[in-house]
């Protein structure tokens, strides 16, 4: 992962911070999580390898 310009693949699409996905915007990308925000709330996606996923 490039720490200066992190990216993630969501639904087959490569996204970076600031990219819009439907009503959500990618706010932050960490090694195992992606934070998406919209005016109505937020979603945290846990990516493969995230030991917190149950």
Image (cartoon, helix red, strand yellow):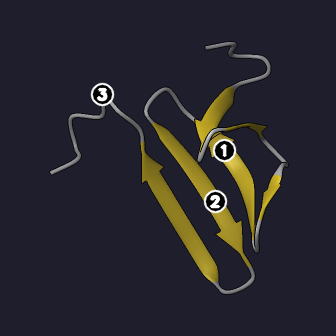
Q: Secondary structure at mark 1?
A: strand
Which residue in the rendered view is the most extreme toward the front? 12
Decide which of tag 3 and tag 1 comes sooner along the chain: 1
Residue occupying image coordinates x 63% and y 39% = 12
Q: Nearer the viewer, mark 3 or mark 1?
A: 3
Q: Is residue 8 above or below residue 25?
A: above
Q: Which residue reaches farthest bottom?
A: 40
Q: Residues within 10 Å of mark 3 (few under 14, many from 20)?
A: few
**C-alpha span from label 2 to label 3:** 19 Å
Q: Which mark is residue 28?
A: 1
Residue position for label 2: 36
Q: Quadrant of residue 22?
A: bottom right
How many marks the image carries: the answer is 3
Q: Identify which residue is drawn at 68% across, 16% down.
A: 3
Q: Secondary structure at mark 3?
A: loop
Measure the C-alpha gap from mark 3 to mark 1: 18 Å
Residue reaching furthest to the left: 54
Q: Position of residue 2 (x, y in %)?
A: 69, 13
Residue drawn at (72%, 75%) of the image: 38
Q: Is residue 6 left or right of residue 49?
A: right
Pick the residue in front: 3 or 50.
50
Q: Is residue 5 left or right of residue 1?
A: right
**Mark 1 crowdedness (10 Å alpha carbons): few <14, some 14-19, many ≥20:** some
Please provide percent x and percent y for residue 11: 59, 47
Residue identified by numbered label 3: 49
Q: Secondary structure at mark 2?
A: strand
Q: Nearer the viewer, residue 3 or 24?
A: 24
Query: Label 2: few (<14), some or many (≥20) within 10 Å?
Result: many
Check contact, mark 2 vs mark 1: CB within 8 A: no
Image-based side of 52 in relation to 27, left or right = left
- 12 displayed left or right of 46: right
């Amino acid at each position: 992962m490039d720490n200066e310009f992190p990216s993630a693949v969501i639904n087959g699409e490569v996204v970076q911070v600031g990219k819009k996905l439907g009503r959500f915007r990618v706010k932050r990308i960490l090694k195992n999580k992606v934070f998406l925000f919209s005016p109505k709330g937020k979603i945290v996606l846990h990516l493969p390898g995230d030991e917190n996923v149950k």
